[in-house]
Image (cartoon, grey):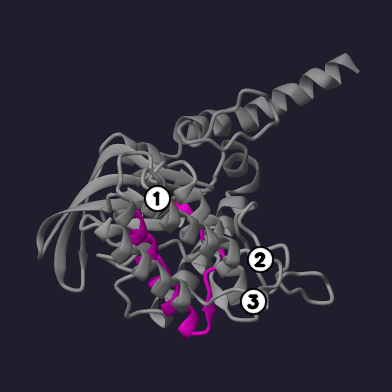
Amino acid sequence: MLIRGLERAAYFSARTLPQLFTAGRQMSAYCVLPEIGREIVGPSFVGRRALRDGASWSFLQGGASYSLHSTGRIIGSGGEKEVLSGTLTGPRGVQDVAILVNMLQSCFFDRLFFGGKKAEKQRQELDAKVAREERLLEEISGSEYVDRTSLVSPLHTEDGIVRVAPLARGSLETVLTGKITLPKALGILGDAARGLSFIHDREHVHSDIKPENILVSQGGRGMVTDIGCMGPLGSMEIGGTPGFQDPSRPTLDSKKPLLAKESDIYAFGLTILDVISPHEWSTTPEQRVLHLEIENLALTSIQANPLRRPTAREIAEELRRMDISAARL
């Protein structure tokens, strides 16, 4: 038995160790394995690491030559996504950009024992997701309050997909951590409400409204962003953020939630509360009255009966009125 075991070990070593060495040398940057048999898919992907190290790419699109450079500075992340700052050099000169990275969660054991089948499946899913988002962006095109600007077509790399967009000042959440006036906050919220109204007018539901998904442009305009969960009105919900999801949203017989405009309004009401709660703008009687009006608008938006909630257009109009009032105080 001992001899047979040693023969099997020798056979395994002769067949597997060269593959193991080669795969390990090629794939060492893909993931970290602190425990044998446990896959830890972390930040150390080849493409993501290169971008973090300040990689530069040159490519052609539409007959034009471009050069994309990453600064290596991470300005946002979530799920399988990561956003880095960078510059894009092209026909319009040099532009500051946000580099949106969707990387495949490939790992050492997948390449070694399964021929990369897991990575290939992930690529197909990611390609389908990006194609879906690009199609949705075309369907809701035409509003300056919806972030849909892509400076170049998606870049398909060996280990993921990279998209390039103009660099914004940040999300509403990050902007609010600094000093911001009440009129400016109301202006950003009003812009976002107009963007949401534009989406609703095209019979779509965003399905993931929250402070992080309201961008603030370099010019200070608010824009609704991240349409990964968006879909046509009445279609099945595919995602969202717990804590911002409407508990009264409609469901199918299978209890699967359906997309409804009122659910976006609920999330927008919570977003308004998130904006006004941490800030003390009520220093005069007039400001306190305005603060109560804003709070009442938010509470009306999250009331239990969806049919009694205001529309996105009505919220935009109210916020514009309040913005004018706040500027006079």
| Viewer can see residue 103 | no
Q: SS at mark 3? A: helix
Label 2, on which residue? 303
Vertically, is 274 above or below 54? Answer: below
Relative placement, left or right, of 132 versus 309 is left
In which quadrant of the rendered view does residue 113 lie? top right
Instruction: Say if mark 2 contacts mark 3, CB within 8 Å.
Output: yes
Q: Earlier in the sequence, mark 2 or mark 1?
A: 1
Classify residue 303 by image quadrant. bottom right
The residue beneath circle 1 is 285
Magenta stretch, residue numbers: 185-212
Residue 216 lies, in percent from the top left, at 31, 56
Q: Residue at x 28, y 55 (%)?
A: 329
Sequence-wise first label, 1 or 3:
1
In percent of the image, x 56 and y 69: which residue is there?
265
Q: Image height check: is 87 above or below 30?
A: below
Residue at the farthest right position = 1
Choose top left, top right, bottom left or bottom right for residue 197: bottom left
238, 264: nearer the viewer: 264
Q: CA distance from mark 2 to mark 1?
A: 27 Å
Looking at the rendered structure, the secondary structure element under dot 2 is loop
What amino acid is at disc 3?
Arg
